[in-house]
Image (cartoon, grey):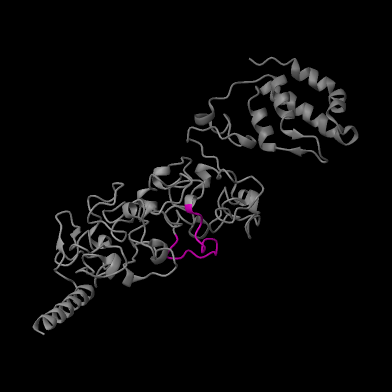
Amino acid sequence: MGKTVGLVLGVVGGLVLGVVGGCGRSSLAESAPDGGFDLPDGASCGDGMCIGGESCSSCSADCGLCEGCGDGMCEPETESCGSCPSDCGVCATCPNGECTEGETCSTCPDDCNVCPGCGDGMCDERGGEDCFSCAVDCGFCEACGDDTCSTSETCGTCPQDCGVCETCGNDMCSASETCASCPVDCGLCETCGDDMCSATESCSSCPADCGRCPRCGDGFCTPMSGEDCLSCAPDCGACVSCGDRSCNATTETCFTCPEDCGICMGCGDGRCRGTEDCASCRRDCGVCSVCGNMRCESMGGFESCANCPSDCGECTVISCAEVLACVFGCIQFTGFPPRISFACLGTCVSRACPDVQFLIDQFAACAIENFATCGDISCIMTECQDEVRACLGARCP
């Protein structure tokens, strides 16, 4: 009889300790030197059950966040990098590519992968979710987006400040990545494209709603700063699949790939506004050419030695024959009326010496006068042969 009573009391006592440990800040789990926690034998932090002496301070992944975590102040007696990285900063071992002892999905999702409930659209604080462990549900932490990668931020929790993680961009959505931290691998989040920049979106995960990040548009594609084909097409260019005439609903929208998905509403009204840019709305915002980025972006004749010698080199004076060949390359005679690139024409003529420029103008006046009756280049060359002869005979100093 005595043994039975003792056994019952022992079981009840164990249950009480489990409940107490799960509901408050417990001292049963001793803080490890690196800020993590050594849990009692048999307990497994991250198994979804707050048992075996686990508490909010030793295992927020199972027991939820402690009261005060997330207020911006690291309370030395109750909080540490192992229990509240959003306040105290991440532990020294995070991220190092391995989910080491003391790390959990809630304290180091970069190493231990995001917690099971992360990504369901609900910010479950009782389940240990917060802006640090699950930005896709809870939104990014307040400091994220200030261009400074602080001690409480990592590549996975704030790519716009810390740059994307090494695995981002390998075409595989790993367990530590989400649509918020790496849309180029995981696809755009469902809310991206609704014209509202929600707390779970940022300039790096959804520029269509939030606008491009400040560094985007400088002409340099810097992956370590979080730039890729989705977050910064003006610098990095369109994604590989863009241009295949199929609008991929996962990563392509009118903003990320107007070529496949059509232009967004408002594009073409003559005003470059809102989140429009040269990649999403060329009609209103122009082309994505930046002089000084060490690339001669000459497609369409818009960057050349005439307007950007630092990228395209200094212009050399060309002869009349070279000017004429260049000019005819700017005109598409296949349709009526022919399509003419005046920017291209200007570049061609700007490289000629004064005599050739004058004689080219003389030829152009003749060509325009006879275009209606001729209709093709061979007829124009015949009617204006004297002007052509004069131009070809010019000798630049």
The residue shown at (40%, 54%) is: 175
Say whether residue 99 is visible.
yes
Q: Is residue 10 left or right of residue 240?
A: left
Q: Nearer the viewer, residue 382 or 256?
A: 256
User: Along the horizontal axis of the image, is 75 left or right of 245?
Assistant: left
Percent from the top left, x then y, of residue 35? 18, 57
176 and 148: which one is in front? Answer: 176
Residue 56 location, x and y as percent?
23, 69
Q: Position of residue 288 (x, y in %)?
A: 55, 43
Q: Quadrant of the N terminus?
A: bottom left
Residue most toward the front? Answer: 1
Magenta stretch prevailing secondary structure: loop
Quadrant the C terminus occupies: top right
Is residue 106 toward the left or the right of residue 297 in the image?
Answer: left
Q: Determine whether 281 is above or below 51 in the image.
A: above
Magenta-drawn stretch contains 194: yes
- Where, by quadrant of the figure, is residue 122 drawn? bottom left
- Residue shown at 17% from the left, 59% from the top: 38
Q: Which region shows up in magenta?
A: 186-201
Whole-percent x and y of residue 135? 38, 61
Q: Residue furthest right?
A: 373
- Residue 372: quadrant of the picture: top right
Rendered image quadrant of residue 203:
bottom left
Q: Would residue 148 be visible to someone looking at this image? A: no
